[in-house]
Amino acid sequence: MLYLFGNMKIFQERLYEQRKLNKMTQKHIADYLNISQPSYIRYENGGAEPSYENLVKLADLFDVSVDYLLGRTQY
């Protein structure tokens, strides 16, 4: 659970920020992760946490570290 590793609010903010910076839609990312768009939306609004596999895929997609997404580092 992300609550054990960092601040969920920071994760939500960074996920949204990275999606916007990379000019991607929620649908695009959901397709990349092979999940539904509503499932991805729950990542951004704090209603669900990604699996470890999807967390790593998100970090790779945005070319950032998992630690950054989880709020453990500033970059």
Image (cartoon, rainbow, N blue to C red):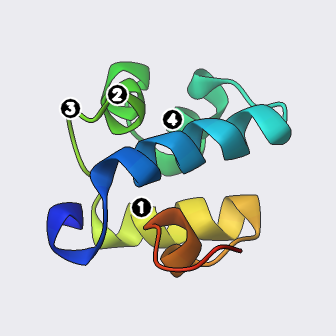
Q: Residues within 10 Å of mark 4 (few under 14, many from 20)?
A: some
Q: Secondary structure at mark 3?
A: loop
Q: Which residue is mark 1?
A: 54
Q: In this rendering, which labeled residue sits more in front, label 4 or label 3?
A: 3
Q: Are the residues at dot 1 and dot 4 in contact (C-beta closer than 8 Å)?
A: no
> Looking at the image, which is closer to me, 5 or 37?
5
Q: Which residue is mark 4?
A: 30
How far is disc 1 from disc 3 in space, using C-alphas? 15 Å
How far is disc 1 from disc 4 in space, using C-alphas? 10 Å
Q: Secondary structure at mark 1?
A: helix
Residue 45 bears which disc, if any? 2
Answer with mark 4 or mark 3, whichever residue precedes in sequence.
Answer: 4
Q: Which residue is mark 3?
A: 47
Residue under the image location 62 percent in, 78 percent down: 65
- Is 29 on the left or on the right of 45, as rendered? right
How many marks are shown on the rendered structure?
4
> Looking at the image, which is closer to me, 9 or 42?
9
If the image is split into quadrants, where does the C terminus sit? bottom right
Residue 22 bears which disc, if any? none
Residue under the image location 66 percent in, 70 percent down: 60
If the image is split into quadrants, where does the N terminus sit? bottom left
Q: Are the residues at dot 1 and dot 3 in contact (C-beta closer than 8 Å)?
A: no
Q: Are the residues at dot 3 and dot 2 in contact (C-beta closer than 8 Å)?
A: yes
Q: Residues within 10 Å of mark 2 (few under 14, many from 20)?
A: some
Q: Amino acid at mark 4?
A: Ala
